[in-house]
Each structure stands twice: as C-alpha cells, then as structure tokens.
Amino acid sequence: MPLNVLCCVKRVPMTGGRIVLTADEQAIETRHLGFTISPHEECGVEEAVRIVEAHGGSSTVLTLGPPEAEEQLRDAMALGIDRAILLQADGELDGGATAAAILEAIEAERAAGTEYDLIFFGNESADAGNYQVGIRVAHALGLPCVTGLKAIAVEDGGLRCEQEVPGGRDVYRVPLPAVVTVKEGLNLPRYPSVPGRMRAKRKPLETRPVAAAAAGVEKVRLAVPAGQGTQVEILGHGPGAAPAVVEVLRGAGVL
Amino acid sequence: MSTLPGRARAVVIGAGIVGNSVAYHLHQQGWRDLVLIDKGPFPNPGGSTGHASNFIFPVDHSKEMTALTADSVRQYKELGVFTRSGGIEVARTEERMQELQRRMSSAASWGIEGASIVTPAEIREMVPFVDARILAGGFYTEGVGVVDSLRAGTLMRERAQAAGALTALANTEVLGIDVERGRVQRVRTTRGDIEAEVVVIACGVWSPKIARMAGASIPLTPAVHQMIDVGPVPRFADAKSHIEYPIVRDMDTNMYERQDGAGLEIGSYAHRPILHDPEEIPSVEEAALSPTEFPFTQADFEQQMEHALELCPEIVGDESVGVKYAINGLLSLTPDGLPLLGETPEVKGLWSVAAVWVKEGPGIGKAVSEWMAHGESEIDLHSSDIARFWEHQKTRAHVRARAAEGFNKTYGIVHPGEQWASNRDVRLAPFHARERDLGAVFFEAAGWERPHWYESNAPLLEEYGDRINRREAEWDARWWSPIINAEHLALRDRAGMVDLTAFAIFDISGPGALAAVQGVAVRQMDVPVGRVVYTPILSPGGGFKADLTIMRIGDDVFRVVTGGAHGAADRKWFSDHLPPDAVLTDVTSAWTTLGLWGPRARDILASLTRDDVSHEGFRFGTCRTIELDTLGVLASRISYVGDLGWELYVPIEQGAKLWDMVWEAGRPHGIAPVGIGVYGTTGRLEKCYRAFGFELESEYNVCEAGMAGPKVKDEDFVGRDAHLRHREEEPAAVMCTLTVDDHMSKSGVKRYMLGREPILTRDGAPLTDRKGRRSYVTSAGAGPSIGRHILMAYLPPEHAREGAELAVEYLGERYPVTVAVAGATPVFDPDNTRIRS
C-alpha cells in the first residue's frame, strides 16, 4: 500500500560544547554554531524514507522557520525525501501558532489534492522543547496521535507503535491516517551520499509565507541549567590509573 | 599536574605541531628552563594541527619550503609517525601538464628524488578508483606520505620533558604579554605570571591576537579549508592501514582525495575565500567540535562534489557511501602565502612561528631554534622572515585582500612573474603620473608601483628590428614584453631614466655611525666622505644577509640604500646591530631616486648643472650634492646596469620636477624611460651582477659568489671569522654565467627559460656540489646587447670553466648551454670601460 508521508522538522543550533545565551537571554548564541535538524526528527526523516522505500508512495518534509531553514530541507531531501515545504516566518512562533501554520499548510495541500496518510513530528524540538506541536496538529485534524515512539511498523493498513515508558514499552496499533511523534533511537539515520546531496539541489521546494500570530505563550527568558559543559576528572597517571578506569567501566555496565 | 615556574628562558605559547617542535629543538640546542603552554588540553589543544589532513607532498616551487619539508619528513620518520603512500598531482588539462613539467624541474633543482610524469593508465594502475579517462597525466612523487602530527608533537614534547628541560602546561591561557623598553618581560597566564627572556608565539590562527597583547603584529588571517569524509567505502573495507593508496591532488579543481582507513577524505581550496578574525574563534568549551573546526557550509561545496564525482565516480557515486564528517577547518593565510618566522620587528625577544603547515612544522621548529640560538639557521629562512613586511602590508585589509586572492591559487598555476591584483597603488612614486602617461606597465615591489616597461617605447621595436627576440610561447611571454629588450638597447646606445623610488633608504648617524656600518659590512667603511661602497652583509656563518650600497654623506652619517622588497628585513638587521651611540632613521619615504644611465648620461646631466660631472671631476664610486637648476640633488655615480651614469636622489616632493628636467634635457639625446625589466634583469645579467634572493642567500658564501675582495679589512664584522675560513677553502661551487646555445623545442617553438630550472650535463645528469647542493638557474633573462639568453648558476668547480658544455631542463625538454664566464667577469663589457668612461 503506497503511503503519503509528511515529516515535520525544525532547524536548531548544532550544539556540542557549552551552551551560551544571547545577551537578552532570549535565544542560544549561534555565532559559532552550525544548524541541524533536531535529532528526534532526523529519525523521523529516516523512518519516512524507509517507509516509502518499502511501501511506495511519496515523502514530503516541512519546516517552519527562517529562509536559511532551506538548508535543513535540502539535508532531508539528500537523505531521500522527495519534496519540501518551507513555511517562512520571521522570528520564533510558539507551539500554538506553529501548529496553526502547519495545519493551514496541510489543508492547503489537501485542497491541492495531497492527503497525508502519516505525519511525523519529533517528540519535542531540541532547542525549545515545548512538546506541543505534534499533538496540537493531530487534535486539530482529528487524527489519532501516539507520542514518544522508539519503533514503528506499517502493518495491515495500520501502524504498530512502540512507546518508551519507564521499565518497558507500550505497544499501540492505530489506523491510518495518523500522527506520530518520535524519539532519537527510533532507527539509525543514514548519512547523506554525495549523489543524494546533488539530487537534493534539484528537488522541488515550495515556500509559503506565514503571518506572525499573536503569541499564546510568552517567553520570559532562557537559563542554562547548572552542570552544563564537560567535567574532566583525572583518575590517575600511567598504569596506576588502570584500576580506577576499570571501576568506571564497571559502573557504566560495560564490563 | 606541574605548576607554572616563575621564570623561564623561553616560553612557547601553543602546543600544536609548531610549538612542540620549537620547544623540543630549543632543548636540542641546549636550552633549559623552557615552558610550553596552551589554553587547550593535550594532546589536541584544538588548533589547526588537530584537524589537519596530515599529508605531505615534498616538491614545491619554493626552494625554502622544499628544504623545510624535506627536513620535516626526516624528523617525522625518525619519530616513527610517517607512512609513505606516494602521491600524484593529476592534470585534467594540457596547461596543467606543462605545469607538472615545471614540478619535475623543481624536483630536480631542489634534489627531490623519486618524481616522475605518469600516464593516465599508470595513474589508474596505482589508484584504481579514479576515472583516468578525464586525465591528461600526472606528477607522481614516491616520497609523499601521511604523518600523525599530534603524536609527533606529543613525542617531541615528552622528550624535552623527560630531559628535564621543559615544563608543559595544558589548559593555561595567556592573559597578557608585558613589554618593557621594547623587550619582552613576562607572560601573564591564568595560572600566574612567568618572567621570560624569549617568548615564542606558535599559536596558529590565534597568533595575531596574542601578538597584539605585546604590541606586535603577526599578519595572518584565519581562513576556511573545507574537508569532508565519506564512507564506509566498500573497496577500503579490508584496508589494513589508514593509508594504502597514493594521495591524489586534483590540481585543476583545487581539490584532493585520499583514502583514510575505510573512508575517502575530500578536501578543497576551490571555494570562495572564507576569512575569519582570530576574535571570532570560539573557546574550547563553546566549540561544538574543536575551536578550529567551524560548521560546514554546504553551499560552498556544491561544485566540489561534482568534481569529486567526476574523478572518483566509483566511490563518490556510490549511494551506500555517506558523508560522515564535514568541516570548515581553519588554517592560516598570509599576504604572500609564506610563513611568518623570526623575531618580531616591534618587540625584542618576541618571536613568531606562525602560518606553518604540518608538512613544514618540525623543520621550521628546528630552523627557528637554530636562529634563536645562533643568529641564523642552516636552511635560509629569508623568504619567511616576519621582518619582511612594511607597515601597510600588516594592515587587516591588506592581509585579507591578499589572502583571499592567494587562497584559490593554492594548487594554482602561478607564473614566476605573476602580479597581485588586489590592494595596488599603495605606494606611488612622485613620477607616477608621468609614467602612467607613458603607458607604464606597473609591477609591484614592497607595495611600490614600479614601471616594468613602457608601452610608449613600442616604436623602439622597429628601430631595433631583428635584435629583439620575440617569445613565441605564451608562457615565456607572460608578464613580459619585447619592449624591455628595446629599452635595454636604447639605454646602451643613448640613455635611459629609471624610477628607483622603491629603494629602501635609511640613514645611520651619531658618534657610533661608523662602528655601526663597519660592524655589519664586509667592505671597509672608513672611507672619505662622498664615497659609495657596495658591500655584502653577512650572517654569522658567512652566508648572505643582503647586498647593498652605503654612502658616506658625513663624518657621522651613512646612507644605506637597499632593494625595497627586502628593505624592511635589512632595516631590522641594521637596527639589531646598532651600538648605543648610533641612530637609524628610515628615510625611505623622504627620498626618491631617479637613475640616469647610458653613454649620453653625462651630456644630459652636464646640460642641467654648472657642477663638474666629468669623469675626473666626479669619479665612479663617489657621491655628492650638485645643483640641477633649482634642485639640490644628491648624485651617486654607481651603476647596476653597466653603463655610465648616476643615481639622483631628491626629497620626494621634488621628484616630479627632477623627472621633468631630466626628461626635457634628455630628449635631444634620445633618452628613453626604462623599466625594471632592464634594471632588474637584462642590464644586470649582462653584467653578471648578483641579486639578493636569487644568487645571494645564506646558503652560499662570498667566495662562491665570486665577490670576495682582494683582502679582508682588519675591523671586525658579522661573519668575519666564517668569511676568513671560506677564503681558505676551495669553493664548493662557483657562480657562473651561461648562455643558451639552442632554444628550439621538439615542437619547433623557441623556448626561453625563466629561472629556477635545473642545470644538467648534456646527458641529463644533475650537478651536485660537494656540499650536496644542486645546480639550478638562479636568474634567467635576455642579454639583448650580446644577443643571447643568459642564465646564472652556481656550478661545481669541475664544471665552472669557460666553454663547459652543459644543459638546462625547461618544461620537460633539455636545451644545450655553455658556460660563458666562471666567476664575476661580465659577459658584456668585461673591462667595465663603459661604467668608467
């Protein structure tokens, strides 16, 4: 059964070191940083590509963000997504406004003849972490929504979903169309190939403006939690350090 | 964890390949109490060494860089971190094939063995994953290899530590460098202060920022080199080591491809220049990867992907092979592409060892340590001397403009005469407007715009007809004009006026002035006021530091005149050797110089002055102020072109007036404006005059250059002991002038050598002197008066005899040459009757 899959992603700073905030504490300082797709959504992209590879159909990637977010859409298309939609917005929208904009885009797609059987979101974005958008879109569309997924399989015209819960996994079966929000670990995303990158340049990308909406949620400020950054502890020098290293490895459960 | 000592002989800042190497080699020089600090962790503090591609191609067109690379390879091998892979520079075009033949010449000139031109089929044999169908051929060097530069640095550091000579501290950031009375005093760090005699900045891309703390300038800019790693490559799945295939440089696309374990690394110098400021580099803590691995900008790599796909379709076109790593790695670029080595001219005791690549790191560490310990290094570092820059060349805008222009030439085909396009018209002679009106074609020297030839002299081509060689091959004729040869003949027949404003001029004055010049000049400087002395300036080991003229213009005033290109470094040399009661004043920008030479020069000058300019009244080798109409002119009767005449010095604002006077007075005598093409090449070569940086460098001594005087003055001077020793030895090489017997190439086009080509026997065997130095063309150019193309070269004594038949290799073919003169006698006017007429 061919499936029409939509995968929603967000352009986020590629962090690795200590996170620094802008002076007004409204954003992450990105002067030295590159941008990427949230790790959860990278798995969503990979899953969307795999499903279409296995079952046929087509895949679309959608983001809401600045013009530069085209980079993330091309990245997704380099991995095998067929086409892209950029909802171009100035500044950051809150969860409600984002969901409304996406909903509007999905309805426009439907009006143009494209109905989605399966819509992927990340469980939460890597930067804002609001846990909002997927559920809001599902609710507005009246579709079933399963969140926090670590495994997905298309079975008998429906979807088998494994959700991570403390101590194990809950398994859900839902009919299609459906909305899912996924987590890192869902799969191991592939690296883009060079031919994939070159094809991505030529794949269709549609840009639609998004009007700024009144915010339902107001951001007061960001704060970096304590304990951020790497801590280095020297366990010893030379062969004398070996027992301490063994202890650490035992503690980590690798030995 | 060691603690920071309060005092050190030398503090080396930066623990990349360069800093570790400097610290180790200072220890090898017997220095103790050394401290090495870095703000990052060991062994990878986060600088450019940590993400370097680590491969080494030994052949470069620069002799200095080739020698430093060869010494580095020797050290990497000794440290056990070198893996030989072989490497091929591949050509997609015929133009590139010619350039690869030049590579062959450089390999032969600098004595690098194991280089050959290979066919596309041979390339495919060695590197089966390239599509050889798009290639015209390649330049294979068997000595190419890959090193572990982080390991090498660690080993060197640990050796110096184990010997008790070095304290090394990671995670120690420099907060300031204190300077007192022009000398470095201490380094302030996050772990406390260290008093230091010597401070070495080996901070790579951060060097300008650290130098500024001391009020010094290290003119480099951090710039991006893009690099991706794709894999896993099925063909490399069974690779037993990290490098098993020759490294491929795809020269025409400014890229390289190399196996790295199971992956293929693809690097590029093809993208737009992406320059940064040292202040923009994040801290170790903030950086996502390392501070010098910036986020990859895919848009700059689009074209490169296609080029990589063309060359390596099997791997790059494989859908299962992914881009696993991609960075915008930072490296250091300088205004002229060369490193920044030596004591900074601004601060005594503060040394720069910056803009150094992994391939030269250990060699440069060793050479700079020798320089610190003994005042000179075995390998001549004059091209990399940080003192070479004039003030405007240290500005951020100049550094960025030239770095941006040079970046895409990393693998470029750069003609020996190629001129920079950016940031021109910075230093203009007072004659500039006149010169422009005369159609001057300007070449740059030290920022000065100098006419190389004048299009207004084109009618002379008709006058001299067959005496002017035309160069049929575009490469030979690039950055050249037959008008140069016509100007030469006009000067020899009548007279020429030459803009010499680019001279660097400094006055040495005060009670110690004589001692100051006496202490550095080989020739006797205690001469009557009004004498002009041409003298070599030597390093302690008796090699050439400079050659220049010194005028005694007063009892306690000497005027030093030297070439602009090396003038800033010469100024530092004289400053460094000043006694306390002498003062050096740079008057470069105060005086302009107009050269007037040719058989009619005296008639022209005499028509402008009532002063005696007769041969008896104004002897060769003297100078004095004469009145030319309303101008007081310091006239100096010497010549670098081999004809009667004078250098005329006036305050720079009077230069235009001087030009107009000489021009008007010269017209009845058929005077021609003459460019540096004559002054620097054709005129000088016919007279076998040596030039610094070509014939004269620290690797050769005065006796080998044929410039030893009949006796050595009694007064001491730098290099005297060595010079006396050299006079006792049989020279290992003799400076010779050769002429080309036959220019005809196999393709029926006459070819003209441009310099730096290897001199061979007629059978094609290289010539090596007993010190192991190869014979190569130090300078090449036309000799229009003798109707021959002239080459200068140091030859081993057995070949240094008039009439010896040899060959020169040029672009893959051999041409017969004959030694015209062994030693200093000129091929034109050997008795110097013209100069002394």
Image (spheres, coloured by chain):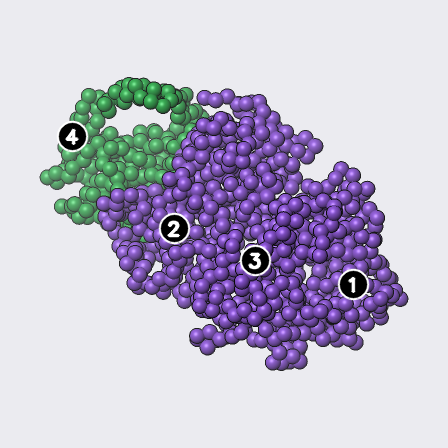
Chain colours: A green, B purple
- Residue drawn at point x = 28 percent, y = 58 percent: B125
Q: In the rendered view, would you say A131 is above or below B89?
A: above
Circles 3 and 2: CB atoms closer than 8 Å: no
10 Å crowding of disc 3: few (<14), some (14-19), many (20+): many
Q: Quadrant of residue B596?
A: bottom right
Name the residue that disc number 4 marks.
A172
The amino acid type of the residue labelled 4 equals Tyr
Name the residue that disc number 2 marks.
B144
| Residue sitting nearer the eye, B692 or B88 | B692
Please name which of the two marks, 4 or 2, marks the residue nearer to the observer: 2
- Does residue B112 appear in the picture of this structure? yes
- Residue drawn at point x = 71 percent, y = 65 percent: B498
Q: Secondary structure at mark 2?
A: loop
Badge number at residue B733:
3
The amino acid type of the residue labelled 2 equals Val
Mark 3 and mark 2, same subunit?
yes
